[in-house]
Image (cartoon, rainbow, N blue to C red):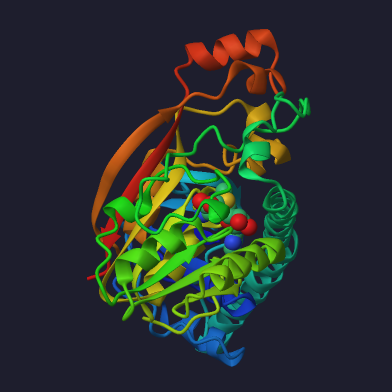
Amino acid sequence: MRILILCTGNSCRSQMAEGVLRSLNPEMEIFSAGTKPEKKVNPNAVTVMREINMDISSHEPTSVEAYIHQSFDFVITVCNNAKESCPVFTGKVKNRLHIGFDDPADATGTQEEVLSVYRKTRDLIKEEFTKFYNTEIKNQMENNEHLKEIVKEKYSKIANQSKVKNETSCCGSTGCCGEIDYTVFSEKYDTLKGYNSEADLGLGCGLPTEFAAIKNGNHVLDLGSGAGNDCFVAHALVGKTGQVTGLDFTDVMIKKAIKNKEKLGFRNIDFIKGDIENMPFENQMFDVVISNCVLNLVPDKQKAFSEIFRVLKNGGHFCVSDVVIKGELPEKLKNDAEIYAGCVSGAITINEYLAVIEQNNFKNTHVQKEKKIDIPFEILLNYLSLDEIEEFKNNKIGIFSITVSADKI
Ligand SMILES: C[S@@+](CC[C@H](N)C(=O)[O-])C[C@H]1O[C@@H](n2cnc3c(N)ncnc32)[C@H](O)[C@@H]1O
């Protein structure tokens, strides 16, 4: 969750709000900025925040320009728009909010009288931002958790199906119209060294191992490893001295992957249960992180990439295949849980995707491969009317699979 709080000077109200939100949940990424940033944070704001054990003394006023190319879940203006002209943020934002407060810097009188005005503003900011956290943010978090439950449920079901059944699961021999063909994205794997047909459920959308520059002896992490398809290919590349770890949050997938590994008797592959947004690994454990058609399913992509950065060694890199969008998806597709689990509605635009990578301090981002994916007409018909399909096609909305790599320097 990324939140930007804006006012003019970024020395007082926005800094206090930043401190309050940070204290409510240190996991969130909170920033504040101003259109005309002051030189330092207002000392009275620092004093009254310290009284409630919130230290904002190390904050520095920052220009909004520093954030203009970044994307945020919320941008909140905190100035009093009746008296001031509030900043307008022109960058990418999911939700805009205004929670206005009078500027305590206007207070006059003795130092004690001035401080009491600051305390009043501080208490109001604390009250309003706690309310905001308990409603909007918690709602969003619950939605994200709900989406993840849907994804787990779907992939538990898919894990128990054969590749052939997956391939015919939409309007094919099983005649189950209303479900997605999860294999419209998949690539041919069978010529790759290490390929294990039992691990191939036809769920990938690229060949990340082909561009991942995996070397003998590397420790590779595969995110959303499913039944282990890419792990077995990576295993052939790391050799006997290397190691491969697959991470997945669906029990049935993990079980299936372990069974596949045991059949082959490999000792240097592990399959671990865990969430990509909160990986159960120490910092800087891996040389290479790969992933195949998974990050689109993770609601908080910022968190996913910051976790990738954390677990990579310095000098390490990632290479992931994923689904991205060009253009705007129709609302009906965006809000459909089934299509979310089928890798489409959770996908973000290619520009947003690359921006998230950059915001997480990766360097040398390189789109290695791009492939257009055509969602079959019969599938679209399950979600859209004929007119809407026509509009979908005319608006040149493109669903692409990309394979992208970047370095942690
Ligand atoms: C489309 S499948 C891809 C599986 C595998 N990469 C392959 O190509 O066969 C997505 C996988 O990601 C897993 N997954 C989705 N979101 C996850 C998350 N937040 N944390 C861990 N695993 C996740 C699902 O359980 C599922 O196994």
Residue, x 47% and y 23% (percent of image)?
Answer: 397
Residue 8 against residue 88 in the figure, above or below: below
Where is ligand 1, by quadrant?
Answer: bottom right
Relative image position of residue 327 (x, y in whole percent): 45, 27
Left or right: 347 as drawn, with respect to 349: right
Relative image position of residue 272 (x, y in whole percent): 58, 74
Residue, x 46% and y 46% (percent of image)?
Answer: 85
Left or right: 312 as drawn, with respect to 113: left
Q: Quadrant of the C terminus?
A: bottom left
Q: How many marks?
A: 0
Q: Quadrant of the N terminus?
A: bottom right
Residue, x 68% and y 28% (percent of image)?
Answer: 332
Residue 246 against residue 403 in the figure, above or below: below
Depth check: 10 or 346 in front?
Answer: 346
Depth check: 18 or 123 in front?
Answer: 18
Can residue 124 be seen by looking at this rendering?
yes
Query: Toward which corner of the image does residue 117 lie, by quadrant?
Result: bottom right
Left or right: 271 as drawn, with respect to 252: left
Relative image position of residue 91 (x, y in whole percent): 40, 44
Residue, x 54% and y 50% (percent of image)?
Answer: 200
Depth check: 355 or 268 in front?
Answer: 268
